[in-house]
């Protein structure tokens, strides 16, 4: 009897928690008719924000993968003085309040910032441009990718890299033929996390890039701007972000499963025909 | 065939340094307890570990020379290394593993190692013996000038081990390149290699054929590692033969001379076990309750006092021996060897 009562308490707590987490998402789609939500997708504000978000996210994520992958590999496979400091620095933007990140970017790369005059000489002015959005997204999202990538690289057996080298493969060939395929699940998971974080970025973007329609107004910024003017547009954009988030979450789960199984990969189709 | 040569190679390890000079002409096994520097030796030859000093090369080719600042990267040393856990690439098929180094030779080696039928399987699907064949095929498909084997039999269960060992024996006999293998098992080393080096704490204690090591172990460690019982005692009288008294008062006779504290080696297969004292009074005799009986395949190891004897399973049946029962272990004076002498 007692045990059933305790089980009931657990179940009740779980039901309340799940309902609490899901209810706001359901409400976004239930507030108006689906037709009105779809209509809003042709609203210029919504379309511009979607375009800005997509473009800046893709460029930012490409840069994150390009610079983050070698960084993570270096940190995962080498122990040098200052290693743990380097890892901590990589993780810093993760715990930094986004508004602080925005201020930091402004006084670093802004016109009056530390690098501002250098950039000015080169004819580059970052703040309040679309590139500023990309920079802000890359700044806040990259730690998520790099952290996951370090974990994925650390999980690959160093004997496999050694075996590849003794079989005549250069370090670069070893990386592409052995390390990357074995770590790809973890890298995909990291990319999904980083993409989700970048897509939702608000604080650093609005401080460093502003909220100009067609230029720097991303989906979260447009949601905020349209909130008291056009609730339907706000809901439509929120719905789009919910759908993208679900896709990213699936990507994350698939990536993690892949990573877990890559070290003991086995195929049922071509299993051993005769085993002793 | 060019010999693999290691000259005064020094690799600092956690609590000691590996110091090694070794010429590998045919098949050499390094045996020693775990942590004695065996695997490090292989990794130094393959270029995965950089020694502090010394030279490594094959024939006239220099792969490593600390004094001249030469150290070829692993991919430029013509070495085939078979890892202890085989280190097969789990995301590639058997064929892709074997052709990892040189695509056009894969078929030849898939057939030679009888793994052609497994070519589309992944390493995760293979048995221990199959994995080892893939690892060997992969290492040899590179056409190495030297083959290195790290504990080739330790990843296998006892049942598969005997088969794989004889397979490996045949393979090594047919190879015309130097082979350096390391193992912690003297029996495996003796079965696979022409020359055996016993390595302890990074230093070679003795090298020789397996027969030489058993006949003339250089020190107590080599003796016990090759399977001998060690008897510690004090010399009572010395002359043509020496009488040594053990701690429990038993007196053992051995040829040769000695004085003070002494250690004798006697091999389990030189000891006879009986339930009554033997008639031949010239035999050395140790008696006491049987401490343990352990079966090793068709051989049985019986421990009486300080010695273990090896007898056949049939003898055990015939004698009807049981743990705790009093038994007699007898061996000839000529079956003993002095391995440490003079209070060391």
Image: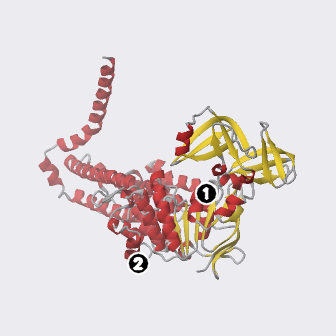
- Left or right? Give the position of A92 relative to B47: left
Q: Residues within 10 Å of mark 2 (few under 14, many from 20)?
A: some
Residue at the disc numbered 1: B186
Residue B285 higher or lower than B137, as above or below: above
Query: Which comes before the other along the chain, label 1 or label 2?
Result: 2
- Left or right? Give the position of B299 relative to A226: right
User: Mark 1, chain letter?
Assistant: B
Q: Residues within 10 Å of mark 1 (few under 14, many from 20)?
A: many
Seen from the viewer's position, the closer of residues A112 and B337 is: B337
Colour treatment of the image: secondary structure
Please state, as top left, top right, bottom left or bottom right, where the N terminus of chain A lies in the image: top left
Count of residue discs = 2
Pointers 1 and 2 within a single chain: yes
Q: Is residue A51 visible?
A: yes
Q: Position of residue B332 (x, y in %)?
A: 72, 50
Which residue sits furthest bottom? Answer: B60
- Left or right? Give the position of A80 relative to A117: right
Q: Image quadrant of residue B148? A: bottom right
In what element is the residue under mark 1?
Answer: helix
Q: Position of residue B82 (x, y in %)?
A: 51, 65
Residue at the disc numbered 2: B105
Which residue sits furthest front? Answer: B279
Q: Is residue A132 visible?
A: no
Please state, as top left, top right, bottom left or bottom right, where the C terminus of chain A lies in the image: bottom left
């Amino acid at each position: 009897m007692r045990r059933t009562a305790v089980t009931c308490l657990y179940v009740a707590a779980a039901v309340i928690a799940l309902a609490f987490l899901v209810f706001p998402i359901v409400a976004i789609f239930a507030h108006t008719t689906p037709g009105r939500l779809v209509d809003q997708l042709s609203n210029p504000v919504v379309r511009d924000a979607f375009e800005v978000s997509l473009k800046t996210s893709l460029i930012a994520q490409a840069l994150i993968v390009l610079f983050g992958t070698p960084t993570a590999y270096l940190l995962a496979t080498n122990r040098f003085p200052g290693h743990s400091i380097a890892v901590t620095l990589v993780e810093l933007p993760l715990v930094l309040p986004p508004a602080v990140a925005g201020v930091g970017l402004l006084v670093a790369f802004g016109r009056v910032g530390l690098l501002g005059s250098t950039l000015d000489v080169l004819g580059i002015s970052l703040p309040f441009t679309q590139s500023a959005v990309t920079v802000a997204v890359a700044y806040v999202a990259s730690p998520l990718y790099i952290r996951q990538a370090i974990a994925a690289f650390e999980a690959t057996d160093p004997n496999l890299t050694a075996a590849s080298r003794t079989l005549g493969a250069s370090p670069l060939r070893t990386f592409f033929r052995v390390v990357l395929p074995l770590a790809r699940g973890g890298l995909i998971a990291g990319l999904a996390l980083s993409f989700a974080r970048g897509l939702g970025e608000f604080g650093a973007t609005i401080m460093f890039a502003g909220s100009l329609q067609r230029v720097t107004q991303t989906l979260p910024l447009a949601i905020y701007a349209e909130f008291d003017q056009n609730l339907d547009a706000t809901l439509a954009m929120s719905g789009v972000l919910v759908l993208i988030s679900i896709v990213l979450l699936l990507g994350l789960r698939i990536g993690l499963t892949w990573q877990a199984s890559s070290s003991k990969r086995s195929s049922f189709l071509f299993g051993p025909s005769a085993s002793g | 065939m060019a010999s693999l040569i290691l000259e005064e190679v020094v690799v600092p390890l956690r609590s000691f340094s590996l110091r090694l000079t070794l010429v590998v002409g045919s098949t050499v096994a390094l045996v020693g307890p775990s942590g004695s520097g065996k695997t490090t030796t292989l990794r130094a030859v393959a270029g995965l570990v950089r020694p502090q000093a010394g030279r490594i090369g094959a024939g006239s080719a220099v792969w490593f020379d600390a004094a001249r600042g030469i150290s070829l990267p692993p991919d430029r040393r013509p070495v085939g290394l078979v890892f202890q856990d085989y280190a097969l690439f789990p995301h590639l098929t058997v064929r892709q593993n074997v052709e990892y180094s040189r695509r056009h030779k894969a078929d030849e080696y898939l057939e030679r190692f009888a793994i052609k039928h497994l070519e589309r399987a992944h390493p995760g699907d293979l048995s221990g013996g199959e994995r080892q064949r893939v690892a060997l095929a992969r290492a040899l498909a590179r056409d190495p000038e030297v083959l290195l084997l790290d504990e080739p039999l330790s990843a296998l269960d006892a049942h598969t081990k005997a088969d794989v060992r004889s397979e490996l024996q045949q393979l090594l006999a047919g190879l015309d390149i130097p082979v350096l293998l390391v193992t912690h098992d003297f029996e495996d080393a003796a079965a696979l290699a022409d020359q055996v080096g016993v390595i302890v704490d990074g230093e070679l204690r003795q090298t020789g054929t397996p027969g030489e090591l058993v006949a003339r172990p250089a020190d107590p460690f080599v003796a016990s590692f090759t399977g001998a019982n060690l008897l510690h005692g004090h010399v009572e009288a010395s002359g043509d033969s020496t009488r040594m008294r053990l701690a429990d008062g038993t007196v053992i006779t051995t040829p040769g001379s000695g004085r003070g504290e002494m250690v004798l080696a006697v091999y389990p297969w030189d000891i006879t076990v009986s339930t009554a004292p033997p008639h031949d009074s010239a035999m050395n005799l140790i008696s006491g309750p049987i401490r343990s009986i352990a079966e090793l395949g068709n051989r049985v190891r019986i421990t009486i006092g300080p010695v273990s004897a090896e007898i056949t399973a049939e003898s055990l049946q015939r004698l009807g021996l049981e743990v705790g029962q009093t038994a007699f272990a007898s061996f000839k004076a000529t079956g003993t060897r002095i391995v440490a002498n003079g209070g060391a």
